[in-house]
Image (tube, coloured by chain):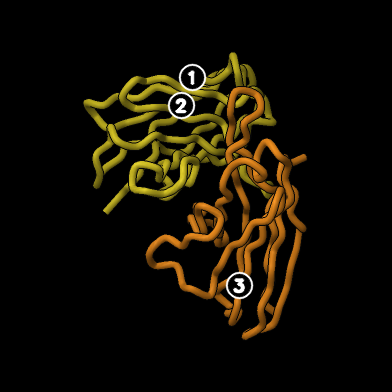
Chain colours: A yellow, B orange
Amino acid sequence: QVQLVQSGAEVKKPGASVRISCTASGYVFNNFFMHWVRQSPGKGLEWMGIINPISGSPTYAQKFQGRVTMTADTSTSTVSMELSSLSSDDTAIYFCARDGAARGYSYGSLDSWGQGTLVTVSS
Amino acid sequence: QSVLTQPPSASGTPGQRVTISCSGSKSNIGTNTVNWYQQLPGTAPKLLIYSDNRRPSGVPDRFSGSKSGTSASLAISGLQSEDEADYYCAAWDDSLNGRGVFGGGTKLTVL
């Protein structure tokens, strides 16, 4: 079965960077794009970006341009997301989620999700 | 403020039919398909509807989606207590070189 396993919770100080990993199993990693979505406490979902695991080419939400870096390692079936210059506004749960287009779903339909990684930014 | 607009709350009694609306614009719902997600408390979202009205395998046919112009709706018939959750609509938006956009979410309460 498809599994996306994310790295553990992080506590960071303002101005620092955080790197979250997401390791996939149960499917052909190269065939599916991966998204990152975050959810601030008590708030809704916010799309951060998408990465093509074969080319490594990312597309970022304008809000995070210059602050986010998404990478993919096909040898370990892992995608990573690094967010820099953290502030308290970045305190959130971060999810990786697979794009279902390669299985016949529509592009942008997120058919499998990681368990989420809580990032707390506090001085 | 979310790009897609949803009512913050909805409610119904067991067995009832409820609908949740999602309003967008030409660049998102008007051009691309709509997806719906269900998020139970403390869990990751789950894909409920894709391509406006298609259900992934395992999703009960009590859940259905529709779209007209720049608006979409999720309908839940035969409401059950376990349907109490947050529901989000989402779509691809062709502005700003392409981006994913979500609604603000609707908290469904089963009375």
Foreground residue among A84 and B24: B24
> Quick one: label 1, few (<14), some, or many (20+) residues within 10 Å?
some
> Quick one: label 3, few (<14), some, or many (20+) residues within 10 Å?
many
As displayed, is residue A69 above or below residue A11?
above
Report whether mark 3 lies on the same chain as mark 2: no
* In the displayed structure image, the side of residue A107 where residue B109 appears, left or right: right
Mark 2 in CB contact with mark 1 (< 8 angstroms): yes
Task: Name the amino acid, label 3.
Answer: Ile
Foreground residue among B55 and A58: B55
* In the displayed structure image, the side of residue A87 where residue A115 appears, left or right: left
Task: Name the amino acid, label 1.
Answer: Thr
Q: Which numbered dot is residue B76? A: 3
**Displayed quadrant of residue A51:** top left
Residue that badge 2 annotates: A81
Residue that badge 1 annotates: A69
Chain letter behind tag 2:
A
Disc 2/disc 1 C-alpha distance (Å)? 6 Å
Q: SS of the residue at dot 1? A: strand
Name the residue located 59 percent from the left edge and 31 percent from the top edge. Answer: B99
Mark 3 in CB contact with mark 1 (< 8 angstroms): no
Whether residue A40 can be seen here: no
Task: Name the amino acid, label 2.
Answer: Met
Quadrant of the frame with the N terminus of chain B: top right
Image position, residue B33 (x, y; %): 56, 47
Chain letter behind tag 3:
B
Chain letter behind tag 1:
A
Name the residue located 75 percent from the left edge and 63 percent from the top edge. Answer: B9
Image position, residue A57 (x, y; %): 41, 20
